[in-house]
Image (tube, helix red, strand yellow):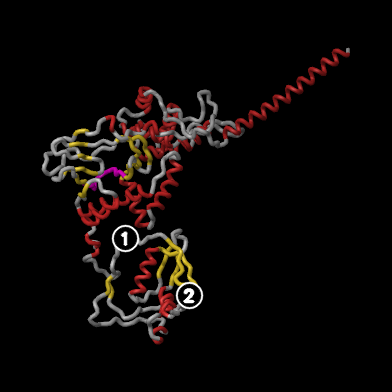
């Protein structure tokens, strides 16, 4: 009797233990399923491009779409599926009901929205939709076809058994990137003394340089650079310039091509004209420097390609000079021709010599309008509330008390006052200076503005105020020049 009782207790304890273990396993399984549904950061953030046989893909297109569908439409559909993995993840999750009160939907609103945009882009003809169907029916039919295409490409969040595996990873485009080659734009020899002969590939295969190319703000590595050659006149044709022989022995000239697609800005670095135009625009619109733009680009590119070598300020300055030369030369409808092999400083001097127009901006010579040309006036029409003595330096006491009121223009022999446009960017390194030991003024000032201020003092011109920007561009230091002049004039000897 004792043995039977012990055996019954053992069976009871085993059943209870097994039941508790099942409950714990069910809890762990629910937690695993919940973790799968949560967005996670994987070590592999992208998946490879769909790699299915072409005959399988072609058969699917022929079966589900109109035979007259064009190659461009097919490629658009393929890239649409690989680009919109988020909406495919939403569609696939709604198709698979997991929790209570969830309903599986075949034609979800997500896939219908994608199909609607495709119909708007290319129309109804390539998709063999019924002419009598309503718009909603056509959208639903195309959405189901896109769902089948997503499964064919492996862009479904569910596996072959129908189990939900999580959101779809972004698709990498590296496998379908085109092959880039930097080569001359000219097809035939364009030397005036030579005939339009075909150009020969000049670089030997073992000597073809492999460089880095920045195109459309994307970084491409190991890009070959080819050079063309005319065997008659011995002119070398590069992607951004031509090298022509002169009448002097061992001397060559360089022709800067305004129509160049790519420009060399480093020993093994080429960029497209979009990059150089951005540098030029940044210099003029944001008054930035080469070092600042280089820091900006390095900060942005580190997120796209962390292992990319940082650009230097010299390379940015090279891009600025090269683009400036071509921009100005294209306005004059000429190609700059200077001696080949000059350093960058000599290139800027030679470019200014031939394209500088002696510092005159051509567009401003015959320009005159109400904004820049005014009749001469002895004093301003309006002077604000004068709280600073520097604003009235050189005026009589009676004139200083005048706050506002229009002043009649002087009808005399005075010529009209015309605004003068000065070309260039006034930038410079900042230095900390103390104007004099009698003046408690310690500021950070640009050396360019400081030089301008000193020249203004020597000319004894009344200057109301000089705006001096710190290099951090965070604040403006206002220096009342006239007040400083007054204190300097009364300083002890």
Residue furthest to the front: 493
User: Residue 357's spot in the image, x, y percent?
Assistant: 22, 60
297 up-or-down from 370: above or below? above
Q: Is residue 384 visible?
A: no
Q: In the rendered structure, which segment of residues is drawn in magenta?
A: 255-264
Query: Which one is in front, 156 or 250?
Result: 250
Residue 276 vertical placement versus 101 (above, below) = below
The answer for how far apart the CA atoms under marks 2 and 1 are is 35 Å
**Percent x, y of residue 202:** 22, 34
Q: Residues within 10 Å of mark 2 (few under 14, many from 20)?
A: few
Q: Which tag is nearer the camera, tag 2 or tag 1?
A: 2
> Where is residue 221, by image quadrant?
top left
- 412 or 213: nearer the viewer: 213
- Count how many numbered circles sit on residues in the image: 2
Picture quadrant of residue 372: bottom left
Which residue: 19% across, 36% down? 229
Q: Residue at x 41, y 44 (%)?
A: 310
| Secondary structure category for the residue under label 1 | loop
Where is residue 65? Give x, y as percent: 35, 29
Pointer 2 and pointer 1: residues touching (CB < 8 Å)?
no
Q: In this view of the protein, which residue sits in the foreground, 115 or 171?
A: 171
Residue 424, numbered circle: 1
In this view of the protein, can residue 327 be seen by the observer? Answer: yes
Residue 438 is tagged as 2
In the rendered structure, does residue 147 fall within the stretch colored magenta?
Answer: no
């Amino acid at each position: 009797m004792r043995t039977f009782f012990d055996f019954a207790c053992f069976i009871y304890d085993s059943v209870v233990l097994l039941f508790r273990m099942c409950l714990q396993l069910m809890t762990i399984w629910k937690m695993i399923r919940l973790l799968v549904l949560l967005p996670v950061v994987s070590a592999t953030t992208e998946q490879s491009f769909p790699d299915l046989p072409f005959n399988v893909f072609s058969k699917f297109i022929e079966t589900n779409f109109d035979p007259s569908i064009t190659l461009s439409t097919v490629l658009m559909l393929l890239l649409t599926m690989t680009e919109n993995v988020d909406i495919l993840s939403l569609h696939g999750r709604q198709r698979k009901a997991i929790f209570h009160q969830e309903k599986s939907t075949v034609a979800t609103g997500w896939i219908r929205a994608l199909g609607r945009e495709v119909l708007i882009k290319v129309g109804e003809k390539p998709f063999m939709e019924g002419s009598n169907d309503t718009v909603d029916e056509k959208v639903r039919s195309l959405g189901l076809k896109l769902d089948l295409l997503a499964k064919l490409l492996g862009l479904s969040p569910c596996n072959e058994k129908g189990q939900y595996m999580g959101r779809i990873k972004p698709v990498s485009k590296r496998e379908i990137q085109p092959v880039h080659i930097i080569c001359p734009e000219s097809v035939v020899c364009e030397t005036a003394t030579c005939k339009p002969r075909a150009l020969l590939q000049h670089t030997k295969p073992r000597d073809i340089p492999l460089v880095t190319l920045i195109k459309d703000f994307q970084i491409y590595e190991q890009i070959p650079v080819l050079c063309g050659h005319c065997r008659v006149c011995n002119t070398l044709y590069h992607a951004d310039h031509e090298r022509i022989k002169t009448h002097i022995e061992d001397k060559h000239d360089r022709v800067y091509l305004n129509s160049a697609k790519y420009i060399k800005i480093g020993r093994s670095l080429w960029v497209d004209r979009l990059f150089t135009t951005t540098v030029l625009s940044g210099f003029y619109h944001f008054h930035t420097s080469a070092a600042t733009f280089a820091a900006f680009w390095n900060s942005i590119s580190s997120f796209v390609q962390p292992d990319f070598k940082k650009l230097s300020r010299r390379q940015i300055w090279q891009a600025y000079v090269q683009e400036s030369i071509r921009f100005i030369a294209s306005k004059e409808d000429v190609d700059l021709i200077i001696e080949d092999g000059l350093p960058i400083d000599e290139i800027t001097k030679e470019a200014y010599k031939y394209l500088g127009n002696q510092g005159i901006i051509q567009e401003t010579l015959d320009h005159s309008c109400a904004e820049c040309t005014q009749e001469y006036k002895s004093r301003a029409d309006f002077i604000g509330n004068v709280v600073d003595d520097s604003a009235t330096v050189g005026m009589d006491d009676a004139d200083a008390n005048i706050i506002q009121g229009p002043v009649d223009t002087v009808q005399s022999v005075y010529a009209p006052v015309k605004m003068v446009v000065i070309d260039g960017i006034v930038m410079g390194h900042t230095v900390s200076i103390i104007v004099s030991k009698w003046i408690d003024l310690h500021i950070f000032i640009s050396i360019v503005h400081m030089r301008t201020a000193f020249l203004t003092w020597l000319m004894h011109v009344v200057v109301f105020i000089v705006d001096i920007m710190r290099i951090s561009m965070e604040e403006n230091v206002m220096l009342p020049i006239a007040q400083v002049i007054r204190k300097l004039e009364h300083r002890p000897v």
